[in-house]
Amino acid sequence: MKQLEHQNAKLLEALRLMPAGVIVAVKPPEKTTLANELAQKILRSLPLSMDALVDYASLPMFRHDGRPYDKIGMSLMRSLLRGEAVSNEEIYLILGDGSPE
């Protein structure tokens, strides 16, 4: 059990130090379980503990050319529903404080 706790602590520290915003969600029950500090700074006041299939899909997200993402096309949704690994994808959204990002 101590080894598992040690590995968990190392994983949390690695996520904390990552130079990118990271949100971790699990399936089932399709809930976000962890977000690092940079993700919290990026998203500002958006909730990070949310039902991934409901709350995440309701966020106003846009592609680099301004077209909105459909609900199934969002990166976290593709990962949860299809098992797709998504990286290096820029997403523009209206943040919790109302500002565009």
Image (cartoon, helix red, strand yellow):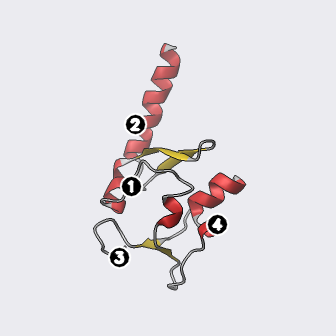
Residue designated by label 1: 39
Q: At 53% across and 57% down in the image, what residue appears? A: 54
Residue designated by label 2: 13
Where disc 4 sits, the SS reads helix
Q: Earlier in the sequence, mark 2 or mark 1?
A: 2
Q: At 52% across and 14% down in the image, what residue appears? A: 1
The residue nearer to you, when weighing 71 against 89, is 71
Q: Earlier in the sequence, mark 1 or mark 3?
A: 1
Name the amino acid, label 2.
Glu
Residue designated by label 4: 72
On screen, residue 53 versus residue 36, left or right, reads: right
The image position of residue 24, as x and y in percent, is 51, 46
CB under 8 Å between callouts 4 and 3?
Answer: no
Q: At 45% across and 31% down in the image, what residue appears? A: 10
In the rendered structure, find residue 18 and report the number of the disc placed on it: none
Name the amino acid, label 1.
Ala
Q: Is residue 90 above or below residue 83?
A: below
Residue 101 sits in which quadrant? bottom left
Residue designated by label 3: 100
Q: Within 10 angstroms of label 4, few (less than 14), some, or many (20 or more) residues? A: some
Residue 79 sits in which quadrant? bottom right
Q: Earlier in the sequence, mark 2 or mark 4?
A: 2
Which label lies toward us, 4 or 1? Answer: 4
Name the amino acid, label 4.
Ile
Name the amino acid, label 3.
Pro
Q: Is residue 86 visible?
A: no
CB under 8 Å between callouts 1 and 3?
Answer: no
Q: Is residue 97 above or below residue 51?
A: below
The alpha-carbon separation of the residues under discs 4 and 1 comes to 21 Å
Q: Earlier in the sequence, mark 3 or mark 2?
A: 2
Which label lies toward us, 2 or 4? Answer: 4
